[in-house]
Amino acid sequence: MKQLSVAIDGPAGAGKSTVARQVAKQLGLIYVDTGAMYRAITWKALTHGVDLTHEETVTQMAQRTDIRLSTDIKGSDVWVDGTTVTEEIRSPEVTAHVSTIAGQSKVREVLVDKQREMGRKGGVVMDGRDIGTHVLPDAEVKVFLTASIEERARRRYQEMIRRGYEVDLEELKEEIGLRDEKDKNREHSPLRPAEDAIHLDTTGLSIDDVISRILHLCRTNLGGEE
Ligand code: CDP
Ligand code: CDP
């Protein structure tokens, strides 16, 4: 059977990583969380006191950084230069700064090369902002996931509380809205749906509903190829 490539893009809190991981698991594909890579570089820059606005320095640092993502069933562990940073890269501080780094074209080139290498043979579910438009433009299945900002903020709020952070729902909503605006309006590979992406508004849909709709798209595609 053909090795499928699945691109899942959309704004923060749309459910991309949750559903992408499950879709990968059910189809026996590798899951690649590209947002974790931008977060990993942001974490390293903050930890080493690197000026995040200095593109040349951040790019050189990115070139020298060994980022590993677990592609196993849990699929959420991240290592930077051999150190586990799974929790650290999801901190509010990293979240507040990640769009700055993600706006830099040279840094993006370094990470996109790594992502394309991971997706070279297919057999991958990759989620992010520019997967269908730029990283894997030939992906057989492209999904653009959205949900209302209220719903996305509520989801992220519950997740942060579960992980032990004290957060304010209104502040979180504002932070997500600002990050979305930056991601949509940046010059290089902005957040936007690919022309051939299927749009899926997940407001009011359960995680299982979304997974089964994407699995259906994947199976239809595989069936059509046989
Ligand atoms: O999980 P959440 O949606 O909050 O964010 P993420 O997927 O971990 O991505 C964090 C940030 O990385 C995004 O807000 C984008 O600025 C950037 N990003 C990107 O520019 N391109 C990607 N393919 C993935 C993430
Ligand atoms: O990756 P992205 O930022 O798009 O979203 P996520 O991290 O997968 O999902 C954010 C939170 O929303 C997680 O805690 C999910 O469990 C939850 N979620 C949900 O409640 N309903 C959905 N349909 C999808 C995700």
Image: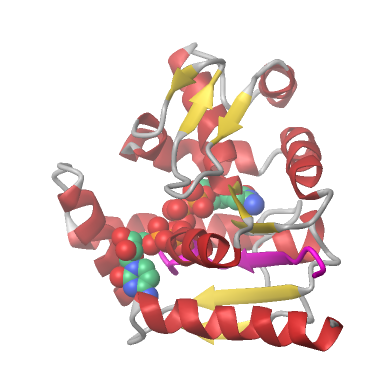
Would you say the magenta stretch is mainly helix, strand or loop? loop
> Residue pushed farthest top?
48
Q: 6 or 159, which is in the foreground?
A: 6
Query: Residue 189, image x and y in percent?
Result: 75, 55
Q: Would you place residue 80 above or below residue 93 in this image?
A: above
Between 139 and 184, the one lying in front of the other is: 139
User: In this picture, which residue range is highlighted in magenta?
Assistant: 1-16
User: Residue at 62% across / 66% down in the picture?
Assistant: 8
139 on left or right of 67: right
Quadrant location, the N terminus: bottom right
Residue ID at (67%, 69%) = 192
Residue 122 spot, x, y in % from top left: 79, 56
Q: Nearer the viewer, residue 198 or 218?
A: 218
Task: State which quadrant residue 200 falls in.
Answer: bottom right
87 up-or-down from 8: above or below: above
87 relative to 192 in the view: left or right: left
Residue 152, visible in the rendered structure? no
Vertical order, 155 against 143 (above or below): above
Residue 15 magenta-highlighted = yes
